[in-house]
Image (tube, grey):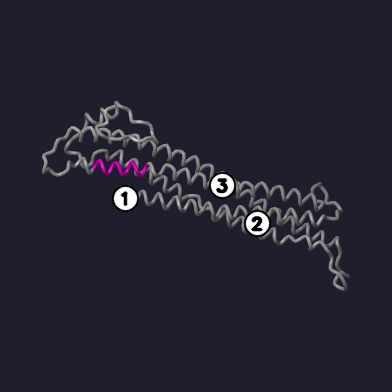
Amino acid sequence: MADGGYRWQGHAPAPDAARVEAIHAGYDEAGAATFAEPARAAAVERIDAALAAARAGDLTTAADQLTRARSVLAGLDPAALEPRRGLAGLFDSRRKRLKAFREAFRRAAASLTAAASDLAGHVEAAARRSAALDGVWTGIRDAMVELDAHLFAAARRLAGHRPAEDAPPHPLEARKAALDACRAAALGALPLIRGAQNADARAAEALKACSDGMAAWSRDWSEALGLAGKRPRKVRPDRERLLRLRDGMVARIDRALAELTASSARRAAVGTRLSDLRAPL
């Protein structure tokens, strides 16, 4: 394909030669200042879509759920199973304490079951956002192909133009520069979209780990407290095991909260960079 001096760069399929020829043949000198406007507008629109998608999916509610779940777990102290000593223990017993502790656990388990369901919803939403961003990424790449076709045609037109020595620049020169800038912004948006997807994926992985972990914690504690069967059983709970399971779930939540903070920061950085790319257009 004769390029008329335009140096095509990869990252998108090369434009079809027939498309370039059609644009070149249909060029109207009177429309030089607005040449390729539909192609430019389409690219800008898709960059806007990338920016909107990068700003969507606030993780605040997920973080709030995790924080509440952590508080609920912190309130379940296996030390409460041990009766008081001395005179205070005269009206106290292991049986009473086990019964009260089981009730506290049931309330906590119900709260964490609801939290796990909510977190699973956030994981599904992240998957939908990732699929939407795939579509945005493809749209920007396709917009670049169309821009390239117009840039090839513009370069060929300018190559055939021989202005007088003191003549002002051809209007198509400035237009081509604007199209080049738009193409560069579109190119810069592609890795940023992948960055937003990666941030979402890491956050979703952490949320899924917590959702699954909450279900496992409820099963394990139910078993340890003699509640796994149809009727409660008389058991002597293993306080060390209960504490180990609780602290393990708290640690998992803490890791997830740290990941949500990092993911939110990464998404915010992607949004800022996309906004910077979009601003001059």
The three-letter code of the residue at mark 1 reads: Pro
Residue at the extreme bottom of the image, as rendered: 87
- Secondary structure under tag 1 reads loop
Report whether 243 appears left or right of 253: right
Residue at which label 1 appears:
280
Which mark is nearer the camera, 2 or 3? 3
Going from the N terminus, do you reach mark 3 or mark 1 first? 3
Q: In the picture shown, does residue 76 fall above or below 84?
A: above
Q: Predominant secondary structure in magenta?
A: helix
Q: In the picture shown, does residue 264 fall above or below 126?
A: below
Residue at which label 3 appears:
202
Residue at which label 2 appears:
69
Which region shows up in magenta?
175-186
Q: Which residue is drawn at the image coordinates 82% and 59% (left, top)?
A: 98
- Secondary structure under tag 2 reads helix
Q: Position of residue 25 (x, y in %)?
A: 22, 29
- Give the alpha-carbon distance from disc 2 to disc 3, as whole Å: 20 Å
The three-letter code of the residue at mark 3 reads: Arg
Mark 2: few, some, or many residues within 10 Å (few <14, many ≥20)? many
